[in-house]
Image (spheres, grey):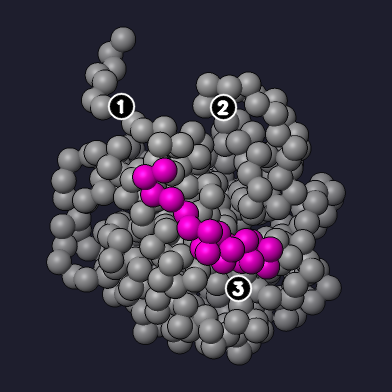
Amino acid sequence: MAFEKIQKIPDAEELIKRVPFPSTLQAVKMQRDMELQNIIQGKSNKFLLIIGPCSADNEDTVCDYVTRLAEVGEKVKDKLFIVPRVYTNKPRTTGEGYKGMLHQPNPTEAPDMASGILAIRQMHVRVISETGLTAADEMLYPDNLAYCQDLLSYIAVGARSVENQHHRLTCSGVEIPVGMKNPTCGDFSIMYNAIQAAQASHSFIYQGYEVSTQGNPLAHAILRGSVNRHGEDVPNYHYEHLLRAVNLYRERGLANPMIVVDANHNNSGKKFAEQPRIVKEILYSRRHNSDNIAQVVRGLMIESYIEEGSQEVGGKVYGKSITDPCLGWAATEKLLLEIADIL
């Protein structure tokens, strides 16, 4: 076989012993999980906001950002439920470029995945400890879920992973909300097939065991725009798109209809400064159609960091993304207050 073994990755039990999750923080997570579950199930009128950097590339900077987020969150907690994006895996279309903290705990040094998994767990524990907020991460590699599953309150499955059976079946065994993005081609039926699969029970192979799952009724949809055959961005956040997505959702008869709209990626054409405008259009669409859109479109995903824009790996600007460009903190704080005001 043409695989060179570099190092043995510690198993999940070993890593959890090295970086335990204190019982006091477990209680914080349990409370937040319950509140988020009530939102997904329509028992709470709070609006879900998943917000943070494109990729979590530095523990100190991420904790600084989430601390700021928590402070603003206190001002809007009667209307918004904020889940920070602490995304530790970065999908790469061609396989080239920085792949996130899992691969490189230090972005300027060589890959070291054993250290990366340790760094991820340490960062998630620190975020909860210092801010009281439990985070969202992306399920890029289903087998890695065991290393941080006890720390997360939300999982996203990306546009390139949503068609993968391993991702869908793994999500059926997860006990927290999982957002399924529409694929890059934009076909809603693929996204709804993924939700249906995640909400059902299954038997399959996972981490060397034959396992069975009961299904995850908290699996739901994320609209993130798409790309047409010419490589052009095609948004799906406009009023007509939202109404179509809501109607298709209900036709499927899926549990807990819930749509989160990603204001960046192909919805913005990766023009980060467009996110506030897109967010406001979505909120006004909800206000215009309170019987359908407002009942199902109950969350947003926004990419934001301390400094706006992006820089190359190794750049020296504190709190500036080294992957996709993000809103800066000043614009973020303003937008959070505006969202709460519109709601």
Few, some or many residues within 10 Å of mark 1 (<14, 14–19, 20+): few
Residue type, mark 1 in image:
Lys
* Left or right of residue 98, residue 272 in this image: right
Residue 211 coordinates in the image, percent (x, y): 65, 26
Residue type, mark 2 in image:
Tyr
Q: Is residue 270 above or below residue 79?
A: above
- The front one of 191 and 83 is 83
Q: Secondary structure at mark 1?
A: loop
| Quadrant of the frame with the C terminus | bottom right
Residue 77 visible in the snapshot: yes
Residue 224 visible in the snapshot: no
Magenta segment's dominant SS is helix
Residue 220 coordinates in the image, percent (x, y): 68, 53
* Mark earlier in primary sequence (1, 3): 1
Q: Secondary structure at mark 3?
A: strand
Residue 36 occupies which quadrant of the picture? bottom right
Tell me the residue at 72%/81% (across/down): 287
Few, some or many residues within 10 Å of mark 2 (<14, 14–19, 20+): some
Residue 91 coordinates in the image, percent (x, y): 40, 44
Residue 274 coordinates in the image, percent (x, y): 44, 73
Q: Is residue 68 above or below residue 111?
A: below
Q: Pointer 1: what residue?
A: 8
Q: Which residue range is magenta in the image?
A: 17-35
* Left or right of residue 137, residue 58 in this image: left
Tag in front: 1 or 2 = 1
Q: Residue furthest top?
A: 1
Residue 183 occupies which quadrant of the picture? top right
- Specify the label residue 81 is tagged with: 3
- The front one of 80 and 93 is 80
- The front one of 38 and 118 is 118
| Cα distance in 3D space between marks 3 and 2 | 32 Å
